[in-house]
Image (cartoon, coloured by chain):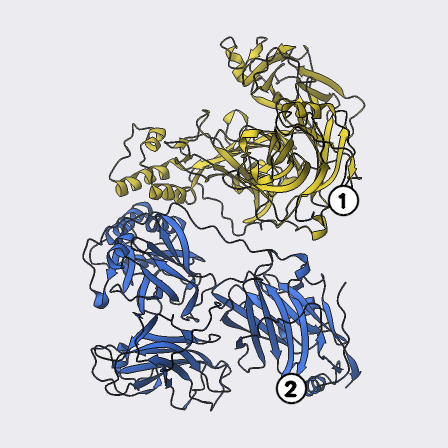
Chain colours: A blue, B yellow
Amino acid sequence: MPALSRWASLPGPSMREAAFMYSTAVAIFLVILVAALQGSAPRESPLPYHIPLDPEGSLELSWNVSYTQEAIHFQLLVRRLKAGVLFGMSDRGELENADLVVLWTDGDTAYFADAWSDQKGQIHLDPQQDYQLLQVQRTPEGLTLLFKRPFGTCDPKDYLIEDGTVHLVYGILEEPFRSLEAINGSGLQMGLQRVQLLKPNIPEPELPSDACTMEVQAPNIQIPSQETTYWCYIKELPKGFSRHHIIKYEPIVTKGNEALVHHMEVFQCAPEMDSVPHFSGPCDSKMKPDRLNYCRHVLAAWALGAKAFYYPEEAGLAFGGPGSSRYLRLEVHYHNPLVIEGRNDSSGIRLYYTAKLRRFNAGIMELGLVYTPVMAIPPRETAFILTGYCTDKCTQLALPPSGIHIFASQLHTHLTGRKVVTVLVRDGREWEIVNQDNHYSPHFQEIRMLKKVVSVHPGDVLITSCTYNTEDRELATVGGFGILEEMCVNYVHYYPQTQLELCKSAVDAGFLQKYFHLINRFNNEDVCTCPQASVSQQFTSVPWNSFNRDVLKALYSFAPISMHCNKSSAVRFQGEWNLQPLPKVISTLEEPTPQCPTSQGRSPAGPTVVSIGGGKG
Amino acid sequence: MPALSRWASLPGPSMREAAFMYSTAVAIFLVILVAALQGSAPRESPLPYHIPLDPEGSLELSWNVSYTQEAIHFQLLVRRLKAGVLFGMSDRGELENADLVVLWTDGDTAYFADAWSDQKGQIHLDPQQDYQLLQVQRTPEGLTLLFKRPFGTCDPKDYLIEDGTVHLVYGILEEPFRSLEAINGSGLQMGLQRVQLLKPNIPEPELPSDACTMEVQAPNIQIPSQETTYWCYIKELPKGFSRHHIIKYEPIVTKGNEALVHHMEVFQCAPEMDSVPHFSGPCDSKMKPDRLNYCRHVLAAWALGAKAFYYPEEAGLAFGGPGSSRYLRLEVHYHNPLVIEGRNDSSGIRLYYTAKLRRFNAGIMELGLVYTPVMAIPPRETAFILTGYCTDKCTQLALPPSGIHIFASQLHTHLTGRKVVTVLVRDGREWEIVNQDNHYSPHFQEIRMLKKVVSVHPGDVLITSCTYNTEDRELATVGGFGILEEMCVNYVHYYPQTQLELCKSAVDAGFLQKYFHLINRFNNEDVCTCPQASVSQQFTSVPWNSFNRDVLKALYSFAPISMHCNKSSAVRFQGEWNLQPLPKVISTLEEPTPQCPTSQGRSPAGPTVVSIGGGKG
């Protein structure tokens, strides 16, 4: 039986706007007030995470995560409610094949329901209602909906909430619809927002009493009236600033600009440069000094929806002192799709640091693929996988006997990256996932704390796989630094710091030449296998078909690799690193099966009435 | 809350045996009587299907199928109950990874529960109880358990009951176990039985009044005391027997031998042979006349668990008359694992036929792969797929404008076949599955009525794929007639009969030679690509590794094919059939998602107590 709630008749100011909008047509007041529905609001914790959904900031999502219940409480604040709202999740932020909740009115009554959209974007009621509405509340800020959703519902139509990026979709219904099925794009303002929903449940370490802070902020700049801006700003450390440990950092976002500041990073410049010119301007400006290109060593990275980042209590990230540059570069990505003009901003990152150095220096290591064109993705692929290895031989040589502890990770690809995963392999068996993002977006690269610190022993293997979508490309996409080339990298943050900065691989170049010879023989000599042709040119001339594609795949999963087992400044550890065998994996990790919710956790199989309309405009 | 039932204290005779067995140890009478439990017995229909499970016939399964409820009612008759019984399903009849129900006693109390076994065969209670116990009944024959199970449970641990073969597993508990987890192989007699559980729900057509019957039966032979016997028997049609239509056939199984008669087929001999010597003996006997090898045209095929086979009302299978042999060969497969001696048998098949020919002759067409070594499976593969095509060009040429109607299908491979599927493709899109068996066994080849007649139009494509397991082989398995070679065939039964008897394909032989050249270049010339080497020899000399395997796969899914679009006696239809392009499939059928049962359909999350023990032996 649907839980039925009735509402007192107290139209709020935003309701008056809506009534005005439809006064000639439907002229209905939507009246929604506080109500306690089935279930109850979460007691154990408030909703610690917040993110604006739309660029105007009229929808704001707050949430918490319960790992024991395997469920999320969502609270959606709707600031100027029109005729309803739609919220949900989909693979990559499309409104097609999305898992949705919808609050809508038919003009008389307002309803809340779990819904889904098919591959054409048509919305349907979900026969299994897995979003459980807990509370509807009217506050001075707007209407808030509190609801709960298990991570997995065991309904094959539903989205499975996993670690990593989640693409939230939202829509603002501008007019009543006679039914859920009648909702269509014309009366709907829509968008997407990326976020990590399943934040790790790590207690915040206490700061030491001597902790200092340093703000690295844009100096009250005017946000350019264009969709995308990367703003660069150089900050100089005080002269004689000695070696310190960064132990925490957090975002400083100028109030009112929460929906515009997409991500921010603080980089340290190369120690070789004794001076870097001051600069504040778009990173692609012609005025930008070239030396800023040498400021690429990440100190801190934040993206929308993330909170403060803490180092483990026994480690800190060294900065300052001899051998370290005094110059920091702040990069702020402003995302301004509505081209709002004249907005000032001083957003940035606050570093917390201490002079009392902690026991361990934290380090950053690159796993994945070497930036080389020998690793390429054929065109028109929906899910082509490239894999980079950090071999047992390299970890045996470079890691201390007690191993290292990875506590955070930042995944990185260029534009065609869709998934990234790093798996730890011990004694030939997949042992543990270091970090995985099945809905990775190159537009959303955060440093993420791991839920669980992963220890890597000497002799372990780390395998990083990236899945690419090149459906809209006509030519092969090769590995490289260019934005139209690809990368597959996991920057892992770990301690204690070692000399190993890079543990990456690529297919052996000689075997790749065998591939070109082989497909030439099969396809009547289209590819130049002459010595003067570059690998990129060779890939460009491949006539792509299923055979050439499949054989390339076969090559990548068979041919020996060339390892980069490097210290800083590209010095390799001693040893033979060419023609290394591919690490063997004899057993793989089981896919985790979601805990299916019991029927008590579900709402009745139909929409819940949440309001009775009243009055004519 | 578990439903608790109490039982009157009336030990049956089989209980006394059990008590005797354990008199020195546990000495407990299991007392089980009639009880009505939660739910109710099926009203709509009795249980029309029956199969013995063990070779001694102490376990017998009856069942029905409800396609509206998507559920099966099972009734398990236990003839001489010892300490319990175990019944279930698994991928290929292993006790590992099986989905089970268990009736067991700890010495005091008897329990019934839904359970599962892990990859080591260890049994566990299933937290989601999807087998619903409806009735426990004591009859003069033994104990019957009536229970219900949905096709799919949406529990990832559970077996999904699909069309095609199901491997039933059973076990007889010979002693009490203190818990479900304590059950182990030592006190357990186990086995498997293959059956098609999801019988099509086709109403039996009425027989015409002039229908005659003809019994093709073994002439009271003695079943050899060995595990496997194929018995051959030649039957002669009366002289001057004119053309008739077979419209139905059914098994005749000698009473008492139900567990021994595994399958039976009736073949017609080749029309060219004016006489065939009479014979009754094992098919592999040295005494068997060579001419019997020319009796291979299937007229009827039955396997354990199947019921009568009916032709559609508008069609019949022609036999007798001019151009048709007067000799039939009966083949009976006796499966006698307990090596029972001195058992006589007269099993066979009863043909129902009519002289009043029906509107259409039924025909049999072979789809799949040509029997040629160019189609090969590398060794040590767990699921290698080979695919055969019946192209649009062939159906365009050979089928009547109104198409043909497939009403039954018999899938066929040799020993390494594990799955078979035929899909109809229309306008490049997968349209409909003709027949599919995801648990196919070469030891269980029935002619199966299709749930739904599939119409094939001129221009349609039929794609037949077989999945093979060659894990235990060291060398490639090539296509061919030998029992250690492989086939991939779907014999489809259809009407109206056409001249097209064979619509099969194989990879183009020239492209296969390109493959051998290519892997030679990659692997240092191990394969003889010289003209005198046969394809089988070439495959035998391939040094198998992932690359050579993957490239063979790539070849099979890319290279052009050679089509056999043949009339009877291997005459091809006119046209160019070599170097044909592979049919393109632009969209595939969606996997059907099972309807998840509601919580009402489930039993409580624990074992159900079904008896209270009493008395000492």
Q: Is residue B435 visible?
A: no
* Depth check, front residue: B105 or B230: B105
Letter of the chain that mark 1 sits on in the rendering: B
Q: Position of residue A293 (x, y in %)?
A: 28, 78
Tell me the quarter of the picture where residue A103 sits: bottom right
Q: Position of residue A155 (x, y in %)?
A: 61, 56
Crowding at dot 1, Cα within 10 Å, few <14 / some 14-19 / many 20+, comes out as some
The relative height of residue A88 versus residue B473 in the rendered view (above or below) is below
Q: Is residue A530 visible?
A: yes
Residue drawn at x 68%, y 78% is: A137
- Amino acid carrying label 1: it is Gln
The relative height of residue B86 versus residue A320 in the rendered view (above or below) is above
Left or right, B595 with respect to B541, comes to right
Tell me the quarter of the picture where residue B228 sits: top right
Residue tagged by mark 2? A140
Q: Separation of disc 2 and disc 1 at Cα?
A: 53 Å
Q: Position of residue B165 (x, y in %)?
A: 59, 35
Q: Position of residue A512 (x, y in %)?
A: 27, 52
The relative height of residue A226 versus residue A359 in the rendered view (above or below) is below
Letter of the chain that mark 2 sits on in the rendering: A
Q: Secondary structure at mark 1?
A: loop
Q: Quadrant of the C terminus of chain B?
A: top right
The relative height of residue B319 versus residue A291 in the rendered view (above or below) is above
Q: Are marks 2 and 1 in contact (CB under 8 Å)?
A: no
* Depth check, front residue: A498 or B70: A498
Tell me the quarter of the picture where residue B188 sits: top right
Q: Secondary structure at mark 2?
A: loop
Task: Tell me the number on the disc at residue B38.
Answer: 1
* Depth check, front residue: A84 or B271: A84
